[in-house]
Image: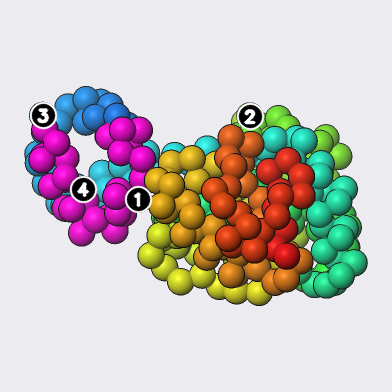
Amino acid sequence: MAADYEAFKRKLKGTIGLDLNYYKQQQMQRRINQWLQRVGAASYDEYIKVLQRDAEERERFTGYLTINTSQFYRDVTVFREIEDKVLPDLVQRFRRLRVWSAGCSTGPEIYTIAMLLEELTPGTRHTLLGTDFDVGALEQAEEAVYSENLLNSLPAKYKKRYFTHEGRMWRLSDTIRDRVRFKRQNLLEDPFETNFHLILCRNVFIYFTQEAQVRLTKKFSDSLVSGGYFIVGNAENLLEPEMADLKRVSYCIYQRV
């Protein structure tokens, strides 16, 4: 079984471009086994053949593996800190900001930042980027139509100001949607853009091996300007942040020194 899984990982990288060697094996293998049971695949080898011939199944499986869970203003304590301290500090020092949401899923996080910046600096065109491995998630992000449960944590004033109700869904205003650029990216292999003032990579590190976490921390830090901020999820603590010139300044929030 172990040899079969190793062969599956090698073939999967060639099929969808995702290298599972960087992910925590026990956690990832359990998720894959659950998926194989769900779709009725008898073995890894049988399922990799399905992926190689079926583009729709590749998209479904990629979405499942990359765990597209997101929400507007997710983790209220962290976003209050971003709204009240991080963004005002950055705007005061740099005026026009470059912000990146890495592993942005369907877009709620980077769109939340766009709303907060519109409140803080009305009409200013900041550079806002959202990246994810999952093409389907990025398509949803660009459409910017969301179910009500994704807006539960968003302060009511922002929901009223920036969304319109369409049946059971909520559509984000073009004012905010047009401020954000999305692109596909494999964090483990693709080059990073640079000179960001704020990078958010939240609830992504928890799936990676320690080796991958340390390497990514350094890459993210190198993409920040001096004094820029790096924000992780509430279940994550960076390994050896000082080796990447980062210091923890608040809950989930690090700053490049």
Give the secondary structure at mark 2. helix
Residue wearing tag 3: 42
Q: Name which residue lies at 30% across and 38% down.
A: 25
Q: Which quadrant of the structure image shows residue 160? A: top right
Q: Is residue 26 magenta?
A: yes
In the rendered image, the quadrant that contains the N terminus is top left
Q: Are marks 3 and 4 in contact (CB under 8 Å)?
A: no
| First in residue order: circle 4 vs circle 2 | 4
| First in residue order: circle 4 vs circle 1 | 4
| Pick the front one: 155 or 80 | 80
CA gap between label 4 and label 2 equals 35 Å
Q: Is residue 64 magenta?
A: no
Residue wearing tag 1: 22
Q: Which quadrant of the structure image shows residue 226? A: bottom right
Q: Residues within 10 Å of mark 1 (few under 14, many from 20)?
A: some
236 to the left or right of 174: left
In the rendered image, the quadrant that contains the C terminus is bottom right
Q: Which residues are magenta?
A: 1-29
Residue wearing tag 2: 149
Q: Are marks 3 and 2 in contact (CB under 8 Å)?
A: no
* Residue 217 appears in the figure: yes
| First in residue order: circle 3 vs circle 4 | 4
Depth-wise, is mark 4 or mark 1 nearer the camera?
Answer: 1
Q: Name which residue lies at 73% across and 41% down.
A: 251
